[in-house]
Image: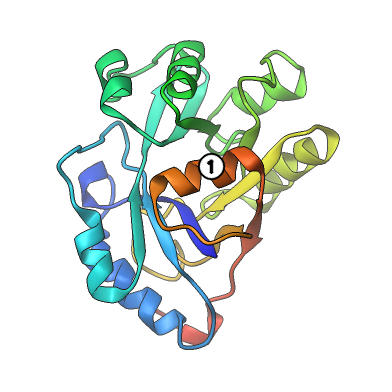
Amino acid sequence: MIIDMHVHTQASGDSSATVDKYCRIIKQYRKNKPFHGLVITEHCLYDQHMTYQKNGDKNDVLIFQGVEVDTNLGHLLLYGITAKFLQQVDVSGRNLNSQKVIKTINDCGGIAIPAHPFRNSIYGRALTRNEIDLDEVSIIEELNGSNSGGQNKKATALIEKTDLKGIGGSDAHYANRGWFLNCATEFENTIYTIEDLVKELRQGYFRAAPLDSSALGEF
């Protein structure tokens, strides 16, 4: 299954994209290549009452919700958010304590993944120097569609030197070819729920995958 793990909409404040726009583009893309879903990871925002999947059901697209939080080491992508976690961590905060966020999401059954670890982040350097316990971080964002090629290559090199795994996400803020459908994550097993997604991440049955949307032309 192909899932874009890092997507933003207008709710992030620095994006003009909508779920409907993403779904329309995905339907066109799937005429030639497989694509199954995406995870909405707004900046510092998790809406427990948001029903993204209603949009997805109309278009046969899986749509899950995570969040991209701001910590003292950089941005973290969080998946498997629960009410218990939200009682302990204010995801709208800035410069959150990274260690606390990672421990809390793990304790609540979710998972934390450093986003773009070599862009505006200390995570890449800290992991390279073994300054972070790898028991706390087992996955990084290897391919980020907004990164430079060099930044993504640094993430791949770190993965090759360690036991880390890598996901891919477009980090799309706009629903156009420059931002969307450039990379994603390929999962070996079928995913139906966010719980399935977290399980597959923990078991390691996935890889970061570049995407080629050139057949669509400009969108």
Element under label 1? helix
Quadrant for the N terminus in the image: bottom right
Crowdedness of circle 1 by 10 Å Cα count: few (<14), some, many (20+)?
some
Query: Which residue is identified by label 1?
Result: 199
Between residue 55 and residue 202, name the one nearer to us: 202
Amino acid type at circle 1 is: Lys
Quarter of the image for residue 84 reads top left
| Residue 202 x/y as whole percent | 60, 38
Q: Is residue 107 above or below residue 40?
A: above
At x 54% / y 81%, what residue is drawn? 33
Residue at the far right in the pictured view: 161
At x 49% / y 20%, what residue is drawn? 102
At x 46% / y 84%, what residue is drawn? 216
Left or right of 203, for residue 44: left
Q: Is residue 39 above or below residue 117?
A: below
| Residue 122 x/y as whole percent | 59, 22
Quadrant for the C terminus in the image: bottom left
Between residue 141 and residue 186, name the one nearer to us: 186
